C-alpha cells in the first residue's frame, strides 16, 4: 500500500490522525528488533525504520544510542534490507530514514532498487537538501517510492514552496528547534502549520502533513491532531526498548490519542 493510500484510508474510514512509529532497525539486535516491529504493527499506521549511521546529525541522544546498539549488533545496509524483507506488511507502509552518506557509498540506484524489492514505500534523508535531490527523486519515481522531505519552523514560505513541490508521501514537519528526542513541551509556532497549508493551497498540491520530533505523550497528540494528518513518535518508543510490555501499552495509548 502506498503512503498516500494509507493516509486516505485512515481519514475516510476512521476519521483520525495517522500514527507513524519510528524505531532503529537492529536495536538492540536483529531478532528483538523484529519483535518490536511486530508490536508496532498492532497500533502504527506507518512504520519508519531507521538505517543506523555512525553520525546521525538530526538525532538526539536516544536515537544516537539506538543507532550505536544496532551497529554493534551487526546492522549494516545489506542486513537492513534483509530485515525489511522479513518484517514488511502490505497494509503498513515502511519508510526508510537514514543519512545520505550511506546511500552514496552503497550506490543510489542500487539502494533505491533494494528499497523497492524489500517493501519500502518511502525514504527520508534529513541531510539531503531539496536543491541536491533531483537524482534521488528521479530514481524514486522510477520505483514508485516517495521521497519525503522535512520542513522546519524556521523555513520561509519560499523554501516551503520549493520543498512541497518536490515532496512525496507526506511533509515531515519538525515540531521543535533542535534534534529528535522526547520532550515535556512542544513549542510550535502557531502560524507554522497554517503557513504550510497556505503554500500547498497556492501551488494546488494535496499532500498529508505529519508532525514529528519531541512527541512523547498523549497530551502532545491531543493538542495537534486536529491540525495535522499524522504524528510521528520515535524516541519515546525507543526509551521503552527494555520493557516490551510497557512499549506496547505506550504505543496503544498513542494510537488511542489519534482518534478525534
Image (spheres, helix red, strand yellow):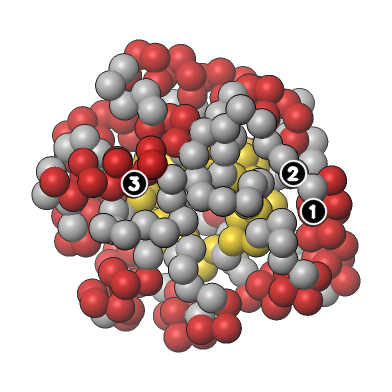
Q: Against 52, is 215 above or below?
A: above
Q: Tag 1's secondary structure? A: helix
Tell me the element at label 2.
loop
**Does the residue at mark 2 contact the one at mark 3 (Cβ under 8 Å)?**
no
Q: Position of residue 143 (x, y in %)?
A: 42, 73
- Where is residue 207 drawn, in percent x and y? 70, 60
Residue count near mark 2 (Cα–Cα under 10 Å), binned few <14, some 14–19, many ≥20 = some
Q: Is residue 85 visible?
A: no
| Disc 3/disc 1 C-alpha distance (Å) | 28 Å
Q: Counting other residues with Cα less than 10 Å from the Cα at mark 1, is it few (<14), some (14-19), or many (20 or more)?
A: some
**Nearer-N-terminus badge (3/1):** 3
Percent coordinates x, y for residue 181 in the rendering: 49, 39
Q: Is the residue under label 1 in contact with that under label 2 (CB below 8 Å)? A: yes
Image quadrant containing the C terminus:
top right
- What's the distance in space between the residues labelled 2 and 3, CA to CA? 24 Å
| Tag of residue 192 | 1
Q: Which mark is residue 188?
A: 2
Q: Residue at x 31, y 26 (%)?
A: 241
Which dot marks residue 64?
3
In the image, what residue occupies the spot 13% across and 46% down?
72
- Could you say whether the residue bearing mark 3 is in a helix, strand or loop? helix
First in sequence: mark 2 vs mark 3:
3
Q: Residue at x 57, y 77 (%)?
A: 130
Residue 50 is labelled as none
Q: Nearer the viewer, residue 214 or 146?
A: 214
**Apparent side of residue 176 relative to residue 93 in the rendered image (left or right):** right
Amino acid at each position: 500500500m502506498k503512503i498516500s493510500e494509507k493516509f486516505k484510508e485512515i481519514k475516510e474510514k476512521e476519521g483520525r490522525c495517522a500514527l507513524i512509529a519510528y524505531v532503529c532497525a537492529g536495536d538492540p539486535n536483529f531478532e528483538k528488533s523484529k519483535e518490536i516491529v511486530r508490536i508496532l504493527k498492532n497500533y502504527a499506521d506507518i512504520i519508519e525504520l531507521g538505517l543506523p549511521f555512525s553520525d546521525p546529525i538530526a538525532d538526539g541522544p536516544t536515537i544516537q544510542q539506538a543507532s550505536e546498539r544496532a551497529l554493534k549488533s551487526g546492522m549494516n545496509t545489506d542486513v537492513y534490507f534483509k530485515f525489511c524483507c522479513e518484517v514488511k506488511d502490505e497494509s503498513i507502509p515502511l519508510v526508510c530514514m537514514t543519512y545520505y552518506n550511506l546511500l552514496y557509498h552503497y550506490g543510489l540506484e542500487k539502494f533505491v532498487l533494494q528499497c523497492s524489492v524489500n517493501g519500502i514505500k518511502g525514504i527520508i534523508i534529513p541531510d539531503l537538501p531539496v536543491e541536491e535531490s533531483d537524482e534521488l527523486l528521479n530514481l524514486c519515481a522510477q520505483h514508485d517510492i516517495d521521497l519525503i522531505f522535512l520542513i522546519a519552523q524556521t523555513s520561509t514560505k519560499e523554501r516551503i514552496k520549493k520543498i512541497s513541490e518536490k515532496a512525496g508521501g507526506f511533509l515531515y514537519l519538525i515540531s521543535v528547534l533542535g534534534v529528535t528526542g522526547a520532550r515535556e513541551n512542544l513549542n510550535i509556532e502557531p502560524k507554522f502549520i497554517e503557513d504550510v497549508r497556505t503554500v500547498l493551497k497556492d501551488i494546488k498540491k494535496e499532500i498529508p502533513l505529519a508532525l514529528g520530533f519531541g512527541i512523547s505523550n498523549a497530551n502532545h497528540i491531543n493538542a495537534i491532531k486536529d491540525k495535522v494528518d499524522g504524528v510521528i513518535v520515535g524516541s519515546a518508543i525507543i526509551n521503552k526498548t527494555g520493557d516490551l510490555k510497557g512499549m506496547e501499552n505506550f504505543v496503544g495509548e498513542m494510537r488511542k490519542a489519534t482518534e478525534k
